[in-house]
Structure formats: structure tokens, C-alpha cells
Image: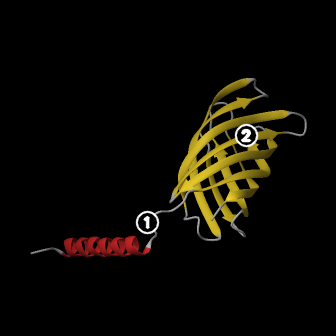
Amino acid sequence: MMGLGHRIALAGALTVSIASALAGQIAPSVQRPTFWGTFALGAAGAADSGFYHSSLGAAVQLRHLIIIGRVTGNDTPEAKRIEDAGILVGAATQPLAPFHFSIAAGLSALNDHYRHRSTVGFPVEAQGTWRFTRWTGIGARVFAVPNDINGYAGISLALQVGRLR
């Protein structure tokens, strides 16, 4: 005789199986990748200072997988401060809807001009974008780049241009 927990697990597995089969019949069999360039401006801060943030990147998405390559610059009014270049991989919502969300993490080469040191950074970013046309979108990015010199984080407004949907 099956216990209540086993029955619930069996019913859940059956429901997921049926839903997956039905979704597979409805979904298109081939989805073209989407790709775009991003330009972002905002503010960032570290333990010892705040700075202006700028970012230039490119991304490609296939289904829910997103790959982002980007370079950033973080400057104070007096001087160049921290810059990094890296690759991030993550998950995103399907690109068909006008609102698009993603989260990604990766590795970057980081250079701190104030301390005259370089290291490896571990960038993490979350994005939300309103893609008001098939080729243009405006959104917000929240990011952090932990590293062993001086981790920093911030927020920026982003413009996306490319094949978004």
C-alpha cells in the first residue's frame, strides 16, 4: 500500500510529465537565437569610494541560456578608477515577450588603477528590460563584482539594440 507522500509525489510527477508533453507540442521546434549590444550608464560604489559606471557589452540568447561579454569602466570625477572585462553566463526569460529578465554570473579580468593592481573578478548581474520594439529596449541592471582588491556594486540604465525578439 502506498503512503500519502508517495501518492503526492506520483501525482506531481504525472502532472509535470503531461504538462511537459503538451508544452512540447505547442512550442516551436526551432527558435532563432537573439542577440544585441548594450550600452549602460549609472553609479557604482566600493568600500572606499563611489564612482560613475559605464558598460559596453554584447549578448546572445538561445532559449533560456544567455551569454554576455562586456567591458566596464568606473571613474571618479578626478581619475580612472576600476575597469574590468569579462564573460557571464546565465538564465533569461524567453525573448518573445516585451519584458525581458535575466541573471548571469562569470569571470572577468579586473584592473584597479588607484591601487595599481590587477586580479580576477566574479561579476554577477541581473537585468530587466522593456523591449518596446523588436530592435530596441530600455532597462535597468543591478550588478556586483566581488574580487580580492576592492569589490564593488551598482545600478545602471541600459539601452539594448539588436535582434531582441
Query: In the rendered structure, which amino acid carries the disc numbered 1?
Result: Ser
Quadrant into which the C terminus falls: bottom right
Q: Residue at x 76, y 51 (%)?
A: 39
Query: In the rendered structure, which amino acid carries the disc numbered 2?
Result: Ala
Q: Which residue is mark 1?
A: 29
Q: Residue at x 65, y 46 (%)?
A: 144
At which x and y percent is residue 5?
22, 72
At which x and y percent is residue 87?
60, 41
**Circle 1 crowding by C-alpha within 10 Å: few under 14, some 14–19, many from 20:** few
- Colour pattern: secondary structure
- The answer to which image quadrant residue 21 occupies is bottom left
Nearer mark to the viewer, of 2 and 1: 1
- Kindly indicate whether the residue at mark 1 contacts the one at mark 2 (C-beta within 8 angstroms): no
Toward the left, the furthest residue is 1
Disc 1 is placed on an element classified as loop
Real-space CA distance between mark 2 and mark 1, rounded to the nearest whole angstrom: 49 Å
Q: Which residue is mark 2?
A: 47
Disc 2 is placed on an element classified as loop
